[in-house]
Amino acid sequence: MKKWIVIVAAMLLAMNVNAQQMHKNDVRYRGFIEVGPTVRLDDPQFILQMSTSHGAALGSVFVGAGIGSNSYFVTSHDYDEEDLVRGGVDLFVNIKGDWDQFWVMPSLDIKMGTSFGYAHGVMGELGAGVRFRLNRLTALGLNAYFKAIYESPDFDTADTGYEDGLFAMTGVKLLFEF
């Protein structure tokens, strides 16, 4: 047990020393974990979204890539089964901007990529919110966002259960930045 305490203390001390050596304009690693509920605008459908993105930040601009998971809880009358749960995966490029000289700061978020699974197609997401900096390296935030997935009419999916086209959704996400 003492061995684990020493290892954890050494890791925390190393993070603290590294944080003190950073300058404001250094390129540094950033990571984000986001979780939140989403509702489709054209069909009342609950979707749980989870995503993580990792990349580099220079000052107040973050550029990275990420992966997301979508869990669709389908209760529409168009399906033979009741209360279906379907999934999807998003792969995206993420650009974030914030004003990091404050402890409470507004932020903007743009994601562009592709979606696989229940909704197939080109994906885009635009979000705005507020972040609360916990220390120099971590923050908690809340984002409201609009997300759209466009599925081409030429894409043949026998298992989707909906028509081709644009699928718009909106929601809120709780995020943790590290």
Image (spheres, rainbow, N blue to C red):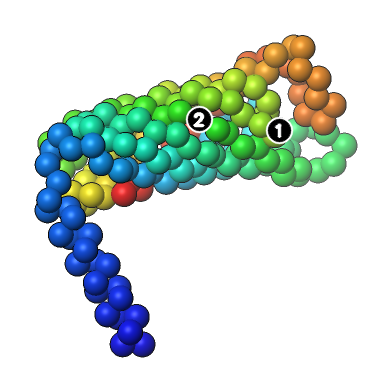
The answer to whether 152 is drawn above or below residue 121 in the figure is: above
Q: Residue at x 68, y 26 (%)?
A: 120
Helix, strand or loop at mark 2: strand
Task: Give residue 145's position: percent from left, percent from top.
Answer: 43, 28
Can residue 144 be seen here? The reply is: no
- In this view, the mark in front (1 or 2): 2
Q: Which mark is residue 92?
A: 2
Q: If the image is split into quadrants, where does the N terminus sit? A: bottom left
Q: Nearer the viewer, residue 30 or 119?
A: 30
Q: Name the mark on residue 118.
A: 1
**Does label 1 or label 2 sit earlier along the sequence?**
2
Drawn side of residue 117 relative to residue 12, left or right: right
Residue furthest to the bottom in view is 1
How many other residues sit within 10 Å of disc 2, few (<14), some (14-19) or many (≥20)? many
The image shows residue 68, relative to residue 21, as above or below, that is: above
Question: Which residue is at a point 23% across and 37% down the rendered structure image?
Answer: 27
Residue 71, picture quadrant: top right
